[in-house]
Image: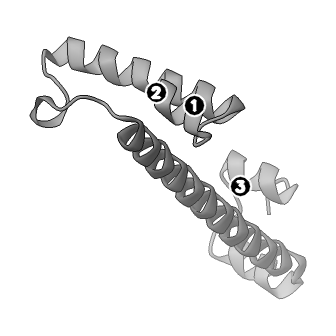
Amino acid sequence: MSEAHESGDLRGDRFRDAKRLVAQRIANQQKIGKLNKAGRKLTAEGLVREYKQRMREQRNLVKKAIYTKDRLLLLTTAVRRLFEDEHFVTLLRAEKLSDLPEQLASRLRLGSV
């Protein structure tokens, strides 16, 4: 880890995060009683590779969260527009579907139909 710090691959927050990652890894290995893969020693390159992999995973999680948020916004908007249509609301009442789940109603800022 000191090699990665000295070479400039890990500085500041990245160094702190990598240090925490190594500590977690060691704790996990001690829990299960195993050495790292094939008993290899952790190198600066390995640490940087592990850090970059974790950062890729975090970026992917953020992308998924943004995608899910966008889809939820689209669906919420569509349902809100449906409830603005008096014919749709009348149809729901005729079918005895006048209650909404609380979470949906609060998200739509509506009461019952």
Inspect this view and state whether residue 6 appears. Answer: yes
Q: CA distance from mark 2 to mark 3?
A: 49 Å
Left or right, residue 105 beside residue 53? right
Q: Residue at left 70%, top 48%?
A: 103
Residue 95 image point, x, y percent: 62, 75
Q: Which residue is mark 1?
A: 5
- Is there a contact, CB below 8 Å, between mark 1 and mark 2? yes
Category of crowding for the residue at label 3, using alpha-carbon neighbours closer than 10 angstroms: few (below 14), some (14–19), many (at least 20): few
Q: CA distance from mark 3 to mark 1?
A: 50 Å
Please name which of the two marks, 3 or 1, marks the residue nearer to the observer: 1
Q: Secondary structure at mark 2?
A: loop
Q: Which residue is mark 2?
A: 1
Q: Which residue is mark 3?
A: 104
Vertically, is 3 above or below 34? below
Q: Residue at left 23%, top 28%?
A: 41
Q: Looking at numbered disc 3 in the image, what kind of residue is underneath it?
A: Leu
Q: Looking at numbered disc 2 in the image, what kind of residue is underneath it?
A: Met
Inspect this view and state whether residue 97 appears. Answer: no
Left or right, residue 112 beside residue 62? right
Residue 94 image point, x, y percent: 69, 77
Rendering quarter of residue 46 = top left
Vertically, is 63 above or below 28? below
Colouring chosen for the image of the structure: one colour
Q: Earlier in the sequence, mark 3 or mark 1?
A: 1
Circle number at residue 73: none
Q: Looking at numbered disc 1 in the image, what kind of residue is underneath it?
A: His
Vertically, is 80 above or below 111? below
Q: Earlier in the sequence, mark 2 or mark 3?
A: 2
Query: If the image is split into quadrants, where does the C terminus sit?
Result: bottom right
Residue 13 image point, x, y percent: 69, 31
Residue 40 image point, x, y percent: 17, 32
